[in-house]
Structures are given as structure tokens and as C-alpha cells.
């Protein structure tokens, strides 16, 4: 069973940057797709970014493409670098691991979780105008 531990997040003014980290533990963690979803108050959880286990490809929601960058370090650590943050980015951000990588397509289409993900505890990002 994969377990996820997130760090980062916080409060920043619009136009600023934040960096989220997620460390996965478990024997199969390095083979999982990993990524981030977010959930704003009163809204559904939506995909933000995903990266393959091999780190060969990354996927982004249209709303963050060009501003956010996802990367993978040492196989089990995923970083989400968030630049040019906007108030609309305010949400709880959840790290996710997906053994079948359905989250990649869900992120691109702005869909919600598939139900196959393993979740971290979440970290709050607040962007003020």
C-alpha cells in the first residue's frame, strides 16, 4: 500500500509562487503515476497535474498549464512548482498516486478523481488579490 506525505503550501499574494512536495512510500510507489488534485470551498475536486512513473510525460489542466510545473525526483518524490498564482488557485491541494494512470487523462480534461487514487492528507494554498 502506497502512502503519501505532503509538504509546502501556505499563503501568498497574487503573482507569487509556492512549491508543494509529496513523498510516496511503499514498494510499488515508484511505478505509480503521481500528481495533484485540488478542491476549492464548495466545489468538486479537480485534477491539476500528473506525471508518469517514468517521469517521461507530464499532464496539466488547462487552467494551470504554463504556470505550474510538475516534476519527479528519485522516483518517489513529486514536486509541484506553482508560479504566477491567481486567487482562483486557492484550494486544498491533495497529492495522489494512481497505479493505472487514469488520472493523467482526468487532469487534461478537468475531470475529477477516478476512484483508484491513493490520497495524501492535503495542504492548503491561499492566494490573495
Image (spheres, helix red, strand yellow):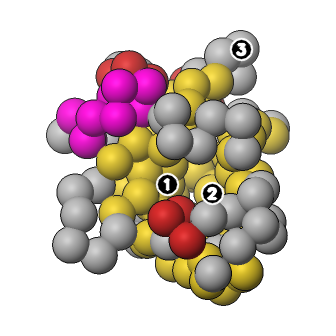
Q: CA distance from mark 2 to mark 3?
A: 18 Å
- Who's the residue at 63% across and 35% down the image? 65
* Labels 1 & 2 near each other (Cβ < 8 A): yes
Determine whether, in the image, residue 86 is placed left or right of residue 89: right
The answer to whether any part of residue 116 appears in the image is: no
Q: Which residue is mark 3?
A: 56
Is residue 54 toward the left or the right of residue 33 in the image?
A: right
Please name whichever residue, 72 or 89, is drawn nearer the observer in this view of the structure: 89
Mark 1, secondary structure of its residue = strand
Q: Is residue 64 left or right of residue 32?
A: right
The stretch of residues the image draws in magenta is 106-114
Q: Earlier in the sequence, mark 1 or mark 3?
A: 3
Query: Disc 1 to disc 2, how far (Cα)?
Result: 6 Å
Question: SS at mark 2?
Answer: strand
Residue bearing the label numbered 1: 95
The local secondary structure at tag 3 comes to loop
Few, some or many C-alpha atoms within 10 Å of disc 2 (few <14, some 14-19, many ≥20)?
many
Residue at image position (42%, 51%) is 37
Between 88 and 96, the one lying in front of the other is: 88
Left or right: residue 125 compared with residue 97: right
Residue 56 at what x, y percent from top left? 71, 14
Could you tell me which quadrant the C terminus lies in? bottom right
When asked about the image quadrant of residue 107, the answer is: top left
Point 61% across, 83% down: residue:
128
What residue is disc 2 on?
Answer: 22
Residue furthest to the front: 129
Q: CA distance from mark 1 to mark 3?
A: 19 Å
Tell me if I can see residue 121 in this picture.
yes
Rendered image quadrant of residue 21 = bottom right
Vertical relation: 8 (above or below) 47? below
Amino acid at each position: 500500500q502506497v502512502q503519501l506525505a505532503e509538504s509546502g503550501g501556505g499563503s501568498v499574494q497574487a503573482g507569487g509562487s509556492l512549491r508543494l512536495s509529496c513523498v510516496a512510500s511503499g514498494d510499488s510507489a515508484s511505478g505509480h503515476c503521481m500528481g495533484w488534485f485540488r478542491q476549492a470551498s464548495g466545489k468538486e475536486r479537480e485534477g491539476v497535474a500528473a506525471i508518469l512513473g517514468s517521469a517521461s510525460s507530464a499532464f496539466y489542466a488547462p487552467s494551470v498549464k504554463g504556470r505550474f510545473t510538475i516534476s519527479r525526483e528519485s522516483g518517489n518524490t513529486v514536486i509541484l512548482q506553482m508560479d504566477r498564482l491567481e486567487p482562483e488557485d486557492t484550494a486544498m491541494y491533495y497529492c495522489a498516486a494512481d497505479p493505472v494512470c487514469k488520472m493523467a487523462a482526468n487532469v487534461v480534461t478537468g475531470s475529477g478523481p477516478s476512484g483508484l487514487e491513493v490520497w495524501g492528507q492535503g495542504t492548503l494554498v491561499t492566494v490573495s488579490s
